[in-house]
Amino acid sequence: MKQKHAPKKFKFNSFLEIGSPDAETDVLLQKAFIEKDALRALLDMSNQRSILIGRTGSGKSAILKHIELTQEKVCRIEPEAMSLRFLSNSTMLDYFRQIEVNLSFFYKILWKHVFIIELLRLNLSYDTQKKENWFITVKEKLLLKKNNPRRIKALDYFDKWGKEFWLDTEKRVKEIENVVHNRFEAEVGASIPALKAKLNTNSDNKDTIKTEIKNKAEHVISETLANDIHEIINILNEEIFIDNQQKHFILIDDLDKEWIPSSIRYELIGAMIEVIKEFQIFRGVKIIISLRDNLYQLIFAGAKHQGGQREKFKPLYVPLTWTKIELQEFLNRRLYLITEHTLDIKTAFDKKYDNSSGFDYMLERTFYRPRDIISYVNHLIESSVNKSYFSYDIIKKAEVGYSIDRLQAIEDEWGENYGEINQIFKWLYGKYNGFNLKNIKEDEFASILFDDNTKQIFKGELLETIVKWQKDQIRFPEFLKNIVFLLFNFGIIGIKKGPTFHVQFFYDVESTLIINDINDECKIYVHKAFYSSLKIITKELEQNQF
């Protein structure tokens, strides 16, 4: 009788991973995909939600990738591939900025033109014959309505853009810029270099001239493009995009990358969001973009987007957050796939330590995001070669590399907004956890106070706060309160407002912390993700059971 052998126990090897932090290179993305409510809202054509907002690593790109792989009519616009950098070097736009022309309207026209082309391409399936037939049909309909001047303008639009209509995005945008440029110079009767020279003179009526030219510039932008494209939108709404069952998706990701200088990028994205809202009149159309929440904050921080703008666009937002149960399912699926259907959370982690499981220990050191889970578990696997599960010693060992990675990721994520933020959290190094704000001394920030290179190191609101403190426009307690609130938004620290409150972190669903809640009696707790990298002393923390 043959003896039965026990099944071979699974063992980790050094080349195994549960996925990549980058959705584009994550080979397990589709096999282990978790369908969240955010995805369902984006795929629902009767739901206006179309702007996916979340922190880096929360899964925004993964959702867009899933839509691209599972839906039939999808177009992805790559910001970097659009090659719009020429807009920052445009002689015309540079002059318009100099005389303070509001370019938001111009940028909106560009996006409308780009989106119309892409939607028509999707609808006509990129078929050349279909495109030609469609133009002929539309023109015939327009010619039958001779008494409608707005329809005649639409006909002019097709004649004007007929040859360039299907060009690549960059060429189309350049063509639009050229048309506005030529018409503007014709309107004012002078070249832009000549106008620039005139503006730089010390003429008594310089302000009057500037106002007149500014008004003409805005008039040319409006007359050249706005009326024409408005009627095209009406035609598409009445005759093409009329059925929510016929789905068309335009996807735009990676808006946080340096595809164009930041000052123009924020204006372009702001204009894009306004156009997305306007295009909601089309049935069966979704223009979906993903925004890092810190980028979203920057876009609406400028003078042109103050007031009720955030509230106005709130119905479009899809905040992306994760629960413990969802993250358990996320990890279970990936472990199951990479371990030949052998391991899940229960069998892969030590059962108990300090009244919590190994998984709970790890989760407490994340921001409740998939990328954090992937990063930590990949570190665990590196330390578990020839092992069959993650012991507590391995979890502690992997925490060191993970903690360093997370702190560097925070610097990368917020550097564009605020500059070298590592300069404003160095004072946390070696702190006892749960310290009071009143115990922080001004001397701990002396290197910042006396630094002559502040403007080269810091940016945005952080720079403004530091400069005010350096110039004695605000006192140290107010400076410190602003720094602590920034660190709270970064996720580095949590704040306990008083004895009856729990410690709040930025990702807590019930968190209501505002800057005015911060006072001398608040207790500050460094997030567990950074215990190792910041060498935090946790004695006080354990006493308070955080």
Image (spheres, grey):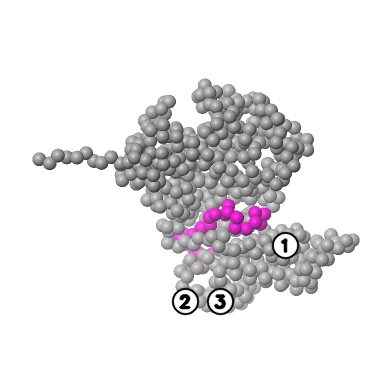
In this rendering, is residue 492 above or below 186?
above
Which one is closest to the eye, mark 1 or mark 2?
A: 1
Span highlighted in magenta in the image: 235-264
Residue that carries the numbered disc 2 in the rendered image: 129
Which one is closest to the eye, mark 2 or mark 3?
A: 2
Q: At 80% from the left edge and 61% from the top edge, which residue is drawn? A: 211
Residue that carries the numbered disc 3 in the rendered image: 139
Is 110 on the left or on the right of 388, as rendered? right
**CA distance for labels 1 and 3:** 37 Å
Instruction: Answer whether residue 249 is magenta in the image.
Output: yes
Residue type at mark 2 is: Gln
Disc 2, SS: helix
Disc 1, SS: helix
One can see residue 133 in this view:
yes
Q: Earlier in the sequence, mark 1 or mark 2?
A: 1
**Where is residue 533 shown, x and y percent of the image?**
54, 35
Q: At 45% from the left edge and 49% from the top edge, which residue is drawn? A: 20
Residue type at mark 3 is: Lys
**Where is residue 265 shown, x and y percent of the image?**
63, 56
Disc 3, SS: helix
Q: Residue furthest top?
A: 543
Q: Badge 2: how crowded within 10 Å, few (<14), some, or many (20+)?
A: few
Q: Earlier in the sequence, mark 2 or mark 3?
A: 2
**Where is residue 448 shown, x and y percent of the image?**
70, 37
The image quadrant of residue 418 is: top right
Instruction: Answer whether residue 148 is magenta in the image.
Output: no
Residue that carries the numbered disc 1 in the rendered image: 94
The image quadrant of residue 466 is: top right
Residue type at mark 1 is: Asp
